[in-house]
Image: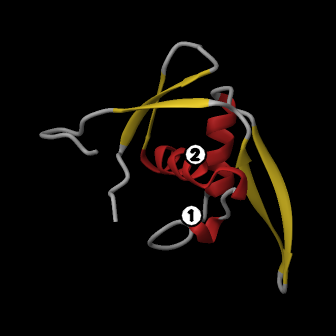
Amino acid sequence: MTRTPHQFRFMLDNSPQFVVSGRVAETLTLLIRRGPKGVAAFDFPGGPAFRLAAYVHSLRELGLVIETKREAHAGGTHGRYVLRSQVTRFVMPEKGGINE
């Protein structure tokens, strides 16, 4: 499995580049990879992202358009998030090396 970078730059619709890191970067990476299938908390490798809505909120504050779809399950509903913005990703090297 390829390791998710801790930090990367992205450009949204020819805007200036932004930097995201940590779980926000992991969330954006997964949103890009999954495309129209979208992302729910249990789609994260290694276990669910319990603060997924907060990570999505952080990305929305940067100007990304992310659709929320509600999905029913036995215990109620959960959100599935679909990235609608065109994002160009630029990988940044980690300290001491290159990550991809």
Which label number is shown at residue 2?
none
Question: Residue drawn 59% across and 13% down?
Answer: 15
Q: Position of residue 24 (x, y in %)?
A: 52, 45
As drawn, 1 above or below 12: below
* Quadrant of the snapshot with the C terminus: top left
> Residue visible at 60% across and 49% down?
31
Return the x and y of residue 18 as percentages of the image width and height: 49, 23
Res 49 label: 1
Q: Which residue is mark 2?
A: 32
Residue 69, x across and y down, in percent = 84, 56
- How would you rate the neighbour count of disc 2 (Cα within 10 Å): few for under 14, some for 14-19, many for 20 or more? many
Nearer the observer: mark 1 or 2; the answer is 2
In this rendering, is residue 100 above or below 69? above
Q: Position of residue 12 (x, y in %)?
A: 60, 23
Q: Look at the image and tell me in which quarter the N terminus lies.
A: bottom left
CA neighbours of label 1 inside 10 A, class few (<14), some (14 to 19), many (20+): some
Q: On screen, 64 above or below 45?
A: above
Residue 21: which quarter of the image?
top left
Mark 1 belongs to which amino acid?
Ala
Left or right of residue 64: residue 4: left
- At label 2, the amino acid type is Ile
> Does residue 20 appear left or right of residue 97 in this picture?
right
Q: CA distance from mark 1 to mark 2?
A: 16 Å
First in residue order: circle 1 vs circle 2: 2
Q: Are marks 1 and 2 in contact (CB under 8 Å)?
A: no
Q: Is residue 87 above or below residue 48?
A: above
Q: Identify which residue is drawn at 55% across, 51% down.
A: 33
Left or right: where 32 falls relative to 25: right
Q: Quadrant of residue 96?
A: top left
